[in-house]
Every structure is written in C-alpha cells, then in structure tokens.
Image: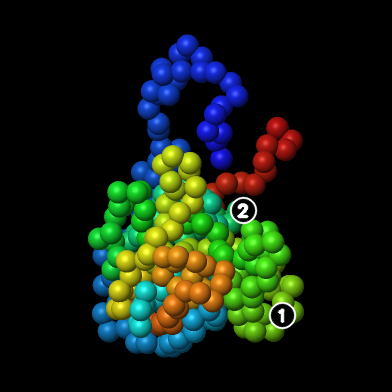
Amino acid sequence: MKPSRPEYSCPDDAADRRAVAPIICYPVDALPQPDLTAYRAARDGWVQLFETIIPPRDAACFEVPAGHFFRITSTDGPQVGDLNLWSADLSAHFYSGKTRALHGTHLSTGDRMWSNLPDLRPLATITDDTLDWYGFDEWGGSVHDVIGTRCDPYTHALLSGGGQYHHCCHSNLTRALARARNMPLHQAEAFIHDVLNVFMCTGFTRDTGQYFMKASPVRPGDYLEFFAETDLLAALSACPGGDCAGQHSSDAAQCHPLLVQVFKPMTPPAGWTGPASNPYDRSHGAGI
Ligand SMILES: [Zn+2]
C-alpha cells in the first residue's frame, strides 16, 4: 500500500509526470474475436447433458466436452461462485492474470478465459451474462472479477491469529478435485489456481488501491454462460461469503447453492474449429 505520508518529496515537475495519459497495455484489436452470433445460434435445440447443484460452502467438479456449453445459475438467493478451469487432462489451467491483462478486471460476454503459458489459448468463451447491465458502479465495482484470488485458509490464519477454517473456496476446490480425480489432497491442492469470481461484485478502492467487495447484485435466475473451446474439467465453489456483503472465511454469511448445467448443441457453431496453437516458436532467443 502506498504510504499516507511519503518519505520523499515531489519533484518540481511532479504534476507534469502525473498528467501523462495512460495507454492500454494490451490493445486487443488484433486478438481473434469469437463469432458470438454463430456461438449463440448453436444453442438452438441444444440438449442438457448434465446438471449438478453446488451445495453452500462446498464445491464440485464437472466435465464439459469441447464444443459444449455450460451455465452457472443463481437459484435460491445471492451467492458468489469461485470457478477453476483446466484442460481435461490437467495439463493447462486458467490464467487469471493474463485474462485480466487482455480483457480487464471484470469479464462479460465475448471475453475468454485464457490458459497458462506456454499455450495461452482460450479454454472457454463467455457467451451470455445476465448481469452485463451492471457495468461499473460509482466505486468502480463490477461483477465477475479476475482481480481476486480465492478465499483460502492460509490468508485467514494469518489475519486471524491462527484461526482454522476449512470451507474457504481454496479448500472446497481442493476437496472437489481430489474426489473427482481420486488424488490425495496435497496433490489436488497444487492444481488449484486463481479463479473467475462468478457473480462477485468487487473493485479496488480509489484512495488506497485495496481490493473491496460488496453485496452481489445477482438475483435468482441470473446466469453466466460459457462455451468450452477444449475438453474441460471445471470446479465451482459456492463461497462461504455468500453474496460477499460482509464476511468470508467463516460460517457467518447466509449461503445458497449454485446450479451448473452442461448443454450439447445439435451442431457446433458454424465455422468453429477450436483454439489454434500459439504461434510463438518457443526458442526464447537462445542461440541468436
Ligand atoms: Zn470464497
């Protein structure tokens, strides 16, 4: 955090230096865009293959074949979900940092969930978001962030003088993956990564730059919908923070289940071929 009283005085040209206009680090004009019209047309006549309810303060894994859709829906009351995505063979995982750099702090329709290096390919594309009306509020808050991480018992222990809480999203996701892939907990834990915070309303305070949360605007029936660009394994945790209006990492908040549905389209989207491999040659300049 920046000091409230800096140790060093401003240079004479401080105002000029601060007045330099920012530029976008990663302009996405050249990024191949999903054909949303084709993706959405593929939903006509789709068939639901699978559904599962994520219980409050717990998580579950589900598989989504390439070319299928999945939806995360609020059912009973406001609830935040923490989503992890992997390629089905666990060789690649969602890379929230680069997704943030490309698409901004909060995702919506047309944005993609990118995988870690060296592939950096889309794992999923968001095809519908019933909360896209929220935009950014007066505090700079918005929904579906890729700026947080996931609530975890280690941070909780540090901040609470050693408190033990076992239903943080990190632990819920760990147990879910261990169950789904028959792994010991410590092996599954190594696969858990920073999440897409589905339905969570967050931002950074303007004065201190601290991560904040506020009550999720999600209503029963709201959903976030994805298209699987490759065979996926996903894990979703119904955060112990509930709507994240007050506390997380405890049993204090009222929590609700989340519904996950997987849909098979009659045919894949017209023109869809799946993600191309990354064109970088991976030589890293060695031997030049
Ligand atoms: Zn959580």
Residue bearing mark 2: 118
The image quadrant that residue 60 belongs to is bottom right
Residue at the (45%, 54%) spot, across then down = 212
Identify the amino acid type marked 2.
Pro
Residue at the (48%, 63%) spot, across then down = 196
Q: Secondary structure at mark 1?
A: loop
The image quadrant that residue 86 belongs to is bottom right
- Inspect this view and state whether residue 6 appears: yes
Give x and y (percent) for residue 154: 67, 63
Labelled disc at residue 183: 1
Relative to 194, say whether 220 is above or below: below
Relative to 109, say whether 54 is above or below: below
Q: Residues within 10 Å of mark 1 (few under 14, many from 20)?
A: some
Residue at the (51%, 18%) spot, across then down = 10
Question: Which quadrant: the C terminus?
Answer: top right
- Inspect this view and state whether residue 86 appears: no
